[in-house]
């Protein structure tokens, strides 16, 4: 069965409490449950990890190189600052989709710059928790062989 790694970056453990006007009321537990249900429907297996520490996320990516087919990642604030996370994504060569709950392009100017997106299969932003489900659908579709017409 295809395995997908779902990574959540800094401060995402506070979802549901942190700035609900921007990020909504869904918790990380809610998002994990939603994704696990969708994964079952899509016939894939998920592993989830969240960390407020850049190195932990990088280590998790390294360990996924030989065990996972792709990644769905919400890098949080590291999107705009982490060359090291970018280098890890490039080094692992795992296809990934970058997701964001809020529309980062409609917020502060610095948030519209992603150090990762040019390596990504795609980016989904602004749909709240649905950004994750759209990202998961996208990476699975990308990884599966095309259907003949």
Image (spheres, grey):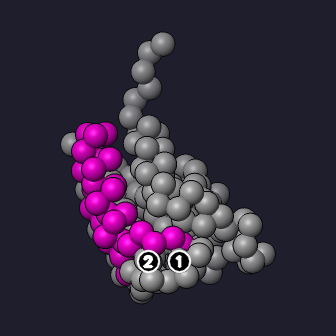
Of 64 and 79, nearer the camera is: 79
Q: In terms of sequence position, does the residue under pointer 1 or pointer 2 come before the other?
A: 2
Q: Secondary structure at mark 2?
A: loop
- Of badges 1 and 2, the one in the foreground is 1
Crowdedness of circle 2 by 10 Å Cα count: few (<14), some, many (20+)? some
Task: Residue 123 in the image: state x and y as whole percent.
Answer: 59, 55
Q: Check if mark 1's residue and mark 2's residue have beta carbons within 8 Å.
A: no
Give the residue at mark 1.
20
Instruction: Tell me the quarter of the image containing the N terminus.
Output: top left
The image quarter containing residue 31 is bottom left
Q: Which mark is residue 35?
A: none
Give the residue furthest to the top: 149
Please indicate whether residue 5 sits to the left or right of residue 119 in the image.
left
Residue at which label 2 appears: 15
Res 140 seen here? yes
Q: Is residue 57 visible?
A: no
Confirm whether the magenta stretch covers residue 49.
Answer: yes
* Tag count: 2
Q: Residue at x 72, y 65 (%)?
A: 105
| Label 1 neighbour load within 10 Å: few <14, some 14-19, many 20+ | few
| Front-most of residues 108 and 4 | 108
Whole-percent x and y of residue 131? 51, 56
Where are the magenta residues, as a range? 23-51
């Amino acid at each position: 069965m295809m395995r997908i790694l779902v990574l959540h970056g800094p401060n995402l453990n506070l979802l549901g409490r942190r700035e609900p006007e921007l990020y909504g009321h869904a918790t990380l537990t809610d998002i994990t449950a939603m994704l696990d249900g969708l994964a079952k429907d899509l016939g894939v297996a998920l592993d989830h990890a969240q960390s407020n520490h850049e190195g932990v996320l990088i280590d998790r990516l390294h360990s996924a190189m030989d065990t996972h087919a792709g990644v769905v990642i919400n890098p949080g604030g590291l999107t705009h600052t982490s060359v090291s996370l970018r280098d890890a994504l490039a080094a692992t060569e795992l296809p990934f989709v970058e997701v964001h709950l809020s529309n980062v392009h409609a917020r502060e100017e610095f948030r519209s710059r992603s150090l990762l997106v040019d390596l990504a299969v795609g980016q989904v932003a602004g749909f709240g928790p649905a950004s994750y489900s759209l990202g998961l659908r996208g990476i699975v579709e990308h990884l599966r062989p095309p259907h003949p017409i």
